[in-house]
Image: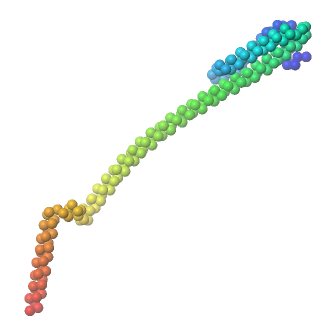
Amino acid sequence: SNPSGRPDPGGDPPWRGVARWAHVRVERRGPMPSRWAILALTMVASIASVAAQDTASAASGAAATDAILTKSVANTEKLRDSVARIVNKSSEEVLNIKSLLTTNARVTKAMNDLMLEMSSMTSRMEAFGVKMENCRMALRAMEQEQEGILSPEEVSHPALLQLEMHAETLHRQVRSAKLGWTHASAI
C-alpha cells in the first residue's frame, strides 16, 4: 500500500524514515561539490523535516500520520535523488572546465613558442637579406674590374687624364705624319 514500493516504516518517528536512507552514497568524481550544492542539500533536508513535522501535527490519528509520513519520505527521497544528480553533474562540469583550461594553457604556450620562433626567423631573414645585398655589390664590383669598365671615380683620376692627353697628342702626330707621307708620295 506504500506508493514508493518500499516497506512502510510503521509507527516509527518521522526522522526514522529519513535516517534509513542515510546509508545511500552519492557517487563523487573529482573535486568536492560546491558550497551551493551543499547549501541546497541542507535546505532540502530542513524543508523536508519541517514539512514532516507540520504534517504530523496537523493530521489526526495514527493511520493518517503514517500515510503522510510515508508520502513525505517518498518526496524526500525523490528530492535527494534530484540533488544527487545535480551534484554529480556539477562535479563533471567542473572536471570538464578544468580540462578545457588545461588544454587552453597548453595551446597558449605553444602559440607563444611559435611567435618567438617566428620573431627569431624574421630577424635572421633580415640579416640574410643585408648580407645578400653586400654580396651582390661585391660581385658587381668584381665584374666591372674584369671587364675593364671604369667607374666615374676611376675616369677622373689624374694619371688617366694625363694618359688620355698623351694619347691624343700621339694620335695627332700619327695623323699629320700619315698626311705628310701621303702628300709626299703623291708628289
Give the residue displayed 43% in from the left and 42% down from the top: 119
Residue 42 located left or right of residue 142: right
Foreground residue among 60 and 75: 60
Foreground residue among 83 and 129: 83
The residue sitting at the bottom extreme is 187
Residue 12 position in % (x across, y down): 84, 7
Assign the N terminus to one quadrant of the image.
top right
Q: Can residue 23 be seen in the rendering of this structure?
A: no
Q: Which quadrant holds residue 6?
A: top right
Q: Can residue 141 be seen in the rendering of this structure?
A: yes
Q: Which quadrant holds residue 150?
A: bottom left
Foreground residue among 153 and 11: 153
Residue 151 located left or right of residue 41: left
Residue 129 position in % (x across, y down): 37, 51
Residue 147 located left or right of residue 85: left
Residue 158 position in % (x across, y down): 14, 63
Give the residue displayed 14% in from the left and 68% down from the top: 163
Give the residue displayed 76% in from the left and 15% down from the top: 47
Assign the C terminus to one quadrant of the image.
bottom left
Coloring scheme of the render?
A: rainbow
Give the residue displayed 16% in from the left and 65% down from the top: 160
Task: Say if 156 sits above or below 77 in the image.
Answer: below
Residue 185 position in % (x across, y down): 10, 89
Task: Say if 60 sits above or below 120 in the image.
Answer: above
| Total numbered labels | 0
Task: Say if 5 sits above or below 111 in the image.
Answer: above
Q: Which quadrant holds residue 94?
A: top right
